[in-house]
Amino acid sequence: MTSIDVNELTKDYGATRAVDRLTFSVRPGRVTGFLGPNGSGKSTTMRLVLGLDRPTGGTAKIGGRAYTDLDDPLRRVGVLLDAQAAHGSRTARDHLLTLAVSNGMGRARVEEVLDEAGLGRVAGRRVKTFSLGMRQRLGIAAALLGDPEVIMLDEPSNGLDPEGIIWVRELMKRLAREGRTVLVSSHLMNETSSFADHLIVLGQGRLLIDMPMQEFLDSRSRPRVRVRVNTTESARFSDALTRKGHRARQGEDGLWTVEGARAAEIGALAAAVGIPVLQLVDEQATLEQAYLDLTAGAAEFKSAAAALTTRKEG
């Protein structure tokens, strides 16, 4: 099994501790979202895993070995850290060919990943003429070049248009379904919630959360249900809810909000007393709301408005 295993990983820069005794594992078969405020240690951790920095203490291994000890690392680990890394005077095809030839791969694979990334028609253009989104696609194509078992992507949706965002979202899900290990760092909460199965969240270099996405959302909010019935049934519906001990209120839009309940439970209650339900939906905190709540005290930089909001909510 190829996983990323971090154990007591620590990195000091002088008197500053950027990564503080991190321990977690990124497992195959799922997309793991890697989140945290600016300065939380995400980028440093990824660099340590890839051998680009030396840890002050602890270990970071891929499939049980340090990245620097891997045979054919491009075939084992695909990485996008900086979409601007490609030489601007090279064409997209030549950039990938340089990587391929130096790692014992042929031209056919280059053409495959160019097409997969949607760059086949512009492969002969120089990279310096590419938009940020096109450079992102090229960086992802390079990460896929060796058909690796492990994929690490830093902000892969940055600069992509809506079609590109959908493409990279489905790509990550497919790679996970194929049994690969997928780690994705992102600041886009709504986008992360659309593809991540598992979350690892850092704050000030420390591990805050390592759990499945749904478990995290459930842990940060109480369940509640929004439900609509015919106005002629409102009084009877209210009585039925009260008899079962539910706290409910009806808004000006006619929708009832039932706290601490699930849709299946309220739907069954309405069916039992013969009240037709016109609308029924579970509500919970979004990933953005849950994340901001979790990291409220762990952000290195915070606007005055955000700090005021945190104080008021506290």
Image: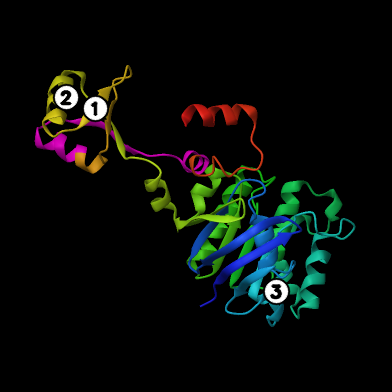
Dot placed on the residue nearer the N-terminal end, 1 or 2:
2
SS at badge 2 = helix
Residue 115 covered by magenta stretch: no
* Residue 248 tag number: 1
Quadrant of residue 10 within the rendered picture: bottom right
Q: Which of 221 and 152 is in front in this view?
A: 221
Identify the disc placed on residue 215. Answer: none
Asked if labels 2 and 1 touch by Cβ distance under 8 angstroms, the answer is: yes
Mark 1 vs mark 3, foreground winner is 1
Question: Residue at position x 71%, y 53% from top?
Answer: 136
Whole-angstrom CA distance, mark 1 to mark 3, is 57 Å
Frontmost residue, 23 versus 1: 23
Q: Name the residue under label 2.
A: 238
Query: Which residue bears the numbered disc 3?
Result: 74
Q: Which of marks 2 and 3 is in front?
A: 2
Does the rendering let one see residue 302?
yes
| Mark 2 or mark 3: whose residue is earlier in sequence | 3
Please indicate whether residue 98 sits to the left or right of residue 59 in the image.
Answer: right
- Residue 72, image x, y percentages: 70, 80
Residue that extends furthest to the top in the rendered view of this protein: 252
x, y percent for residue 217: 41, 46
User: Over which residues does the magenta segment extend?
Assistant: 266-292
Q: What element carries label 3?
A: helix
Q: Earlier in the sequence, mark 1 or mark 3?
A: 3
Number of residues whose C-alpha sits closer than 10 Å to that of mark 2, classed few (under 14), some (14–19) or many (20 or more): some
Identify which amino acid the numbered label 1 is placed on. Ala
